[in-house]
C-alpha cells in the first residue's frame, strides 16, 4: 500500500522544490512532500497516489479535488487571515507548522545538528550604530573561552581594508561550493577562513549582490552545515536587511541584540521594526532581544583586534554579563 504524501506545488518550480527538499531533509513533517510546478503533472500524480494535503498558490483555486478526500492550504503573496491560507515568504519551519495544522498532523520538533552550538544574532534597522564594532568585540571576548565563528552580512563591510587581508576567496565563493560542489566544501571552508582575535572569520562577500539569490532555506542549511563541520560553541551573525529570511534567522538565535541609539529618528526606526515583527507573528524574537544603546565613546581603535581593549569592550561586558557571566570565571 502506498504511503500518503503532501504535495507542494507552485509555478515557480525552484521555490516548490527547495521548500520540499528542505522539509524532507530536516524531517519537519511526519509525511514525505513532493514538488510540482505544473497543474497537469500534479493532477496525474494525484490520480495514482494517496495525497493528504495539497499546498498550492491561491491563484490555483480552480484546482478540483478529483473526488478524493484531500485538504488544501493556499500559499499567498500577501498575509491573509484564515486556516486555508499561508504567507509563502514565511520561514520553512513556520510553513511546515501550517501544513501540519491544515492536514491535522502532529507537528514534528525540528532536530538540531549540534545542540551546544548557539547562534548570536546582532541586527539593527538603524545605520552607523556600532553594530559591527559591537559584534567584533563580543566575538573576540567569547573567543577567549570558546570556539567562535563570525559572519558579516553587511552590504559594504570594508573588511578587506580594515583587516588588511587580500584573500581572493570570500563568502560568495564558499557558498558556491556549498551549493554546487558540496564534496569540496570542507576544504574550501578551511581555505577561506581568517582568524581575528582567536575567532574564525569568513570574509564577507565583496558584492552583496552575489548573495541575493540565496534563499532562506539555503541559509538555514548553510548554518547547519557550518555547525556540523566546525564544531563551534558560538556563531556570531552580524546581520543586515538584504539577507533573505532575516526574521527566520533571528528566530533561530539563542541571543539577539538590537542596536538602538537614543536619538529620536533611530528610536522611531526601532519602534517600526518592532511593530513589523509583532504584526508578522515573530514576537518571540522580541522576547529574546536585548536593546543595545552605546554611549558616545571618546575614541575607538581602527584595528578590530584592538577593540577588545577599548571602552566598547567594557560596555559590551556590562551589557552581556547576564548572558555570558564574564565575572564568574566560567
Image (cartoon, grey):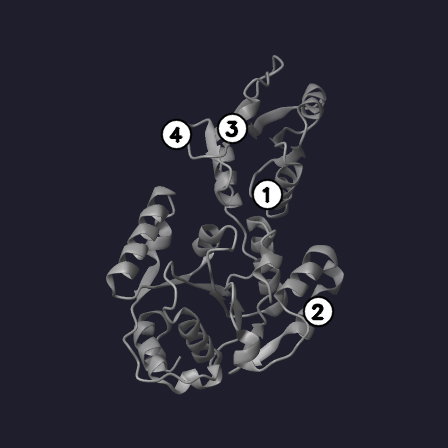
Q: Which is more toward the observer, 103 or 295?
A: 295
Question: Which element is circle 2 on?
Answer: helix
Labels 2 and 1: the sequence-earlier one: 1
Cα distance between the residues tagged 2 and 1:
27 Å
Res. 260 visible in picture: yes
> Dot 3 corresponds to which residue?
74
Labels 3 and 4: the sequence-earlier one: 3
Query: In what quadrant of the picture does the C terminus appear?
Result: bottom left
Labels 4 and 1: the sequence-earlier one: 1
Rendering coords of residue 87 (x, y %): 47, 36
Rendering coords of residue 19 (x, y %): 60, 42
Rendering coords of residue 131 (x, y %): 40, 69
Q: Which mark is residue 81?
A: 4
Question: Which element is circle 3 on?
Answer: strand
Cα distance between the residues tagged 3 and 4:
11 Å
Query: In what quadrant of the picture does the N terminus appear?
Result: top right
In the image, which is nearer the foreground, mark 4 or mark 1?
A: 4
Cα distance between the residues tagged 4 and 1:
24 Å
Mark 2 nearby-residue class (10 Å; few <14, some 14–19, many ≥20): some
Labels 2 and 3: the sequence-earlier one: 3
> Dot 2 corresponds to which residue?
188
Mark 1 nearby-residue class (10 Å; few <14, some 14–19, many ≥20): many
Q: Which residue ends up furthest to the top in the rendered image?
A: 67
The quarter of the picture where residue 69 lies is: top right
Give the vertical position of 217 relative to 306 (above or below).
Answer: above
Q: Residue at the location (59% across, 57% down)? A: 209
Q: Which is more toward the observer, 187 or 310?
A: 310
Rendering coords of residue 203 (x, y %): 59, 71
Cα distance between the residues tagged 2 and 3:
41 Å
Amino acid at each position: 500500500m502506498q504511503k500518503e504524501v503532501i504535495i507542494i506545488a507552485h509555478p515557480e518550480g525552484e521555490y516548490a522544490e527547495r521548500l520540499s527538499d528542505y522539509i524532507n531533509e530536516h524531517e519537519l513533517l511526519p509525511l514525505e512532500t513532493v514538488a510540482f510546478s505544473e497543474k497537469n503533472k500534479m493532477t496525474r500524480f494525484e490520480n495514482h497516489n494517496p495525497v493528504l494535503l495539497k499546498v498550492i498558490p491561491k491563484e490555483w483555486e480552480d484546482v478540483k479535488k478529483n473526488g478524493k478526500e484531500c485538504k488544501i492550504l493556499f500559499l499567498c503573496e500577501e498575509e491573509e487571515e484564515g486556516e486555508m491560507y499561508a504567507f509563502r515568504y514565511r520561514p520553512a519551519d513556520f510553513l511546515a507548522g501550517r501544513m501540519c495544522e491544515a492536514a491535522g498532523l502532529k507537528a514534528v520538533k525540528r532536530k538540531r545538528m549540534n545542540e551546544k552550538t548557539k547562534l548570536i544574532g546582532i541586527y539593527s534597522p538603524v545605520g552607523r550604530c556600532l553594530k559591527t564594532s559591537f559584534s567584533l568585540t563580543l566575538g573576540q571576548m567569547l573567543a577567549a573561552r570558546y570556539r567562535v565563528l563570525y559572519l558579516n552580512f553587511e552590504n559594504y563591510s570594508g573588511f578587506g581594508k580594515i583587516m588588511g587581508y587580500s584573500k581572493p576567496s570570500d563568502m560568495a565563493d564558499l557558498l558556491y561550493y556549498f551549493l554546487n560542489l558540496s564534496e569540496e566544501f570542507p576544504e574550501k571552508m578551511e581555505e577561506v577562513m581568517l582568524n581575528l582575535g582567536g575567532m574564525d572569520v569568513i570574509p564577507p562577500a565583496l558584492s552583496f549582490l552575489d548573495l541575493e539569490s540565496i534563499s532562506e532555506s539555503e541559509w538555514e542549511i548553510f548554518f547547519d552545515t557550518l555547525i556540523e563541520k566546525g564544531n563551534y560553541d558560538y556563531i556570531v551573525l552580524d546581520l543586515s536587511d538584504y539577507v533573505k529570511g532575516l526574521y527566520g534567522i533571528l528566530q533561530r538565535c539563542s541571543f539577539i541584540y538590537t542596536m538602538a541609539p537614543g536619538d529620536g529618528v533611530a528610536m522611531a526606526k526601532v519602534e517600526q521594526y518592532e511593530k513589523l515583527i509583532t504584526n508578522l507573528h515573530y514576537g518571540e524574537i522580541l522576547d529574546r532581544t536585548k536593546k543595545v544603546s552605546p554611549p558616545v565613546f571618546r575614541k575607538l581603535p581602527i584595528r578590530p583586534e584592538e577593540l577588545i581593549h577599548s571602552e566598547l569592550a567594557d560596555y559590551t561586558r556590562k551589557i552581556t554579563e547576564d548572558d555570558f557571566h564574564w565575572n564568574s570565571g566560567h
